Amino acid sequence: MSDTPARLLKLLSLLQTPREWPGGELAERLDVSPRTIRRDVERLRDLGYPVEASRGSVGGYRLVAGAAMPPLLLDDEEAVAIAVGLRAGAGHAIEGVDEASVRALAKLEQVLPSRLRHRVSVLQNATVPLTRGDGATIDPRTLTTLASAATGRERLRFTYRSGDGTRTKRQVEPYRLVSTGQRWYLVAYDIGREDWRTFRVDRVGEPYATGARFAPRPLPAGGADTGGEGAGRDPGSGGGDAARFLARSIRRMQPELRLDVWFGAPAEFVAARLPGILGAPVPDGEGGCRLRTSCTDSLEWVALRLALVDCEFSVHGPPQLVAYLEGLGARLTRAAGPRPGGGERPAGRDPFTGAPEQG
């Protein structure tokens, strides 16, 4: 192989597999001399690839972890597998990896050949995840369109559905995507309304980048209404962080719940089963723990998350959560009681297939 750039790419592709390659085998694979392999390895090192050589009669080469990650070479199957995995992670607001998944997916899909992009879509459409997050799922293509436009400072057009079902057309300058662990939001400057807005991404439809570039505006420090409906300017403030901006806007729209909950289980057990956004419980010294925190989530979601901890618990506040749990408990008790009008309850069914349970 006399073409040096092509040979280097082939060599790099071989070295990125998790094994050590003897110099003679690499030379045979690339149809060059061992001396050429040594020179090519030095070229890769000069480009920032940490190639390690071992001495001895069967000495070889392998790629090791370095201070920074150099570009990776992926074959078709690897690229498809990574894209499908990133789409699965990005489509659900998974705490801790959500924004990174979207950024990586946007970069990968930008360079995927059309044939591979089609394979990714076919594979994803043919599979259904067994578990879903607590928030709405998002089409990853919507997320990557928004992320790419925000990164490239390109204006966006899309349709938006408000909480009451009203649909409007928007043109915005996207600033940042933010995940709360339940939902995705787009923080953007709304050109038609001449103000900052936050948009729930699960209500965004048919987004496309217009190609028109824009100079980034400073994000105000004040909050805005969620849903893309409220004003978001705080006169006299400058700069700000997208996550804090979103948090302020949510607090303005939703009443804050001050939770006071006792759990009959160790703090470590409870913390492992509660979303991180609710904070950490504190041991009470008697084998249980107490959670005192504030949140702006719905009563329904908070009640569900507390019940899913799977241990005894007692809610001391707020009163509206206590009342909601009383009503929910009564409905669940009736659901498990005798059927109205008498008669036996139907046999249990498999929760996954719906087929009668085998006993």
Image: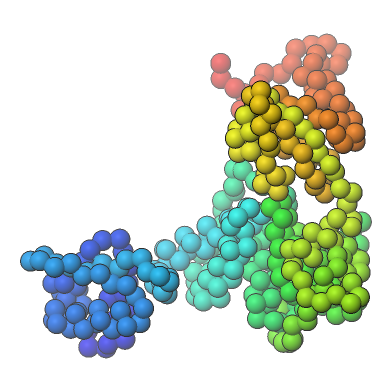
x and y percentages locating residue 135 in the rendered image:
72, 50
The answer to whether any part of residue 2 appears in the image is yes
Q: How many marks?
A: 0
Image coords of residue 12 (percent x, y): 31, 74
- Res 257 → quadrant: top right
Residue 251 lies left or right of residue 106; in this view the side is right
Q: Residue at x 86, y 48 (%)?
A: 256
Relative to residue 15, is residue 162 depicted above or below? above
Q: Residue at x 74, y 69 (%)?
A: 241
Task: Give percent across and percent down for residue 301.
Answer: 78, 41
Asked if 228 appears above or below 259 in the picture, the reply is below
Q: Residue at x 41, y 74 (%)?
A: 70
Which quadrant: the N terminus? bottom left
User: Left of 15 or right of it: where is 284?
Assistant: right
In the figure, 135 relative to 6: above or below? above
* Residue positioned most to the front: 285
